[in-house]
Image (cartoon, rainbow, N blue to C red):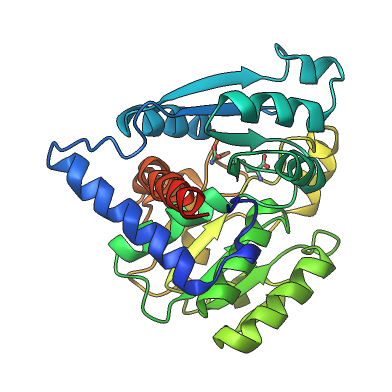
Amino acid sequence: MRHFLTLKDFTKEEILEMIELGLRIKAEVKAGRFTPYLEKQVLAMIFEKSSTRTRVSFETGIFQLGGTGLFLSSRDIQLGRGEPMRDTARVISRMCDMVMIRTYSQSKLQEFADFSEVPVINGLTDEYHPVQLMADYMTMIEHGKDQNPVVAYVGDGNNMAHSWLMMASKLGFELRVATPKGYECDASIVADAAEFAKISGAVIEFTNDPNDAVAGADVVTTDTWVSMGDEEEKERRIKDFSGYTVDKEMMKLAKADAIFLHCLPAYRGLEVSEEVFESEQSVVFDEAENRLHAQKGVMVWLDTKRKEA
Ligand code: CP
Ligand code: NVA
C-alpha cells in the first residue's frame, strides 16, 4: 500500500502515470462519462488549516468517482482537543477507505500514515503541497510547457517552493528558485533535490535576484508571502519581500509566451500585480480546476496499489 505524502517517495514514471490517469478521467468527465472508479468509497478529509480549493476539489472528486467525502475540521473532531494522531488514524482508517490531511508539520502527517490502514494523502503541510504540484504540472502539459521547460519560482522558500524542488528534480526539468535572504528553502530538502537531480538531469539553481530567475523562463510562479501559520510575521515579511512582486516588468523578462501559475489564494499587489494576475499569460484558474482532475488520478492510482498489495 502506498501513501501520497511527498513527491520524494515517487519515481518520475509513477508521477507521470498519476497525471496521465487524471487527464484520462478529465477527458471522460468532459465527455459526460462518470465512471465509478471508487464506488462506495469514503474519503475522510481532515483539516487543521483553512481551505477552499483542496476541500472542494477532493469532495467533488470523490463524489464524481462514485464515493463520498467526509469533511472533518480539527475544530470539531477530538483531534482538536488533544486526541493523538495515532489514535485518530487507527479509528478513521478502520471506517474509511482513504484519508486526506491538511496539517502543520510533515511529521504529524507521517505519524497518521504510520498508523493508518488505508492510503493517506497530503493536502498541505508546512513542508510540502504535493497535490498542488500534480495540478500545476498537468496545467503545464495542457499549455505545452512540458518539453524541457524552464520554471522560475519567485518568493518564499516554503511548502510550494519545496514541492517545485521535488517535481523538478524528479522529472528532470530546469527550476530557478529566487527567494529573499533569510527565506531560502530548507537545506535538507535542497540536498534531497540535488540527489534526485543527479539521476534525472534536472538543473536546479538558487538566487536572491528574481529578475535573474525569470529571464527566459517558460513558466513563472509564485506563492503568498504569508503562509498559514506565518500571520504574526506579516508586516516584516511584506518589507523583506520588497522587489519580489511578479509584475509586468518582471514578466517581460520571461519568454513572450510564458505562462503564470499561482496555487492561490493570491494577494494582489504583494506577490503578484493585478495586471499579471488578470493577464492572458495567467492560467491560474485552469490550474485551480486541475486540482479536481489531478487528485482523481492520485486517488484512483492509490486505490489500485492498495488492491494490488
Ligand atoms: N491552493 C490551495 O491549496 O488552496 P486552498 O488553501 O484553498 O485549499
Ligand atoms: N504556502 C501557502 C499555500 C496555500 C495553498 C500556505 O501554506 O499557506
Q: Is residue 249 left or right of residue 66?
A: right
Q: Where's residue 142, x and y in %?
A: 29, 61
Does 252 appear above or below 119? Answer: below
Determine which quarter of the picture holds residue 64.
Answer: top left
Outermost residue toward the top in this view: 76
Q: Where's residue 205, x and y in %?
A: 66, 80
Q: Is residue 185 left or right of residue 274?
A: right
Q: Where's residue 158, x and y in %?
A: 72, 54
Q: Where's residue 244, x and y in %?
A: 66, 58
Residue 198 visible in this rendered orientation of the protein: yes
Residue in the picture at 39% in, 64% down: 17
Does 86 appear above or below 244? Answer: above
Ligand 2, what quadrant?
top right
Residue in the picture at 48% in, 54% down: 305
Does 269 appear above or below 77? Answer: below
Q: Is residue 275 left or right of residue 207?
A: left
Task: State the residue in front, 30 or 307.
Answer: 307
Number of residue marks: 0
Residue in the picture at 62% in, 19% down: 72
Residue 46 visible in this rendered orientation of the protein: no
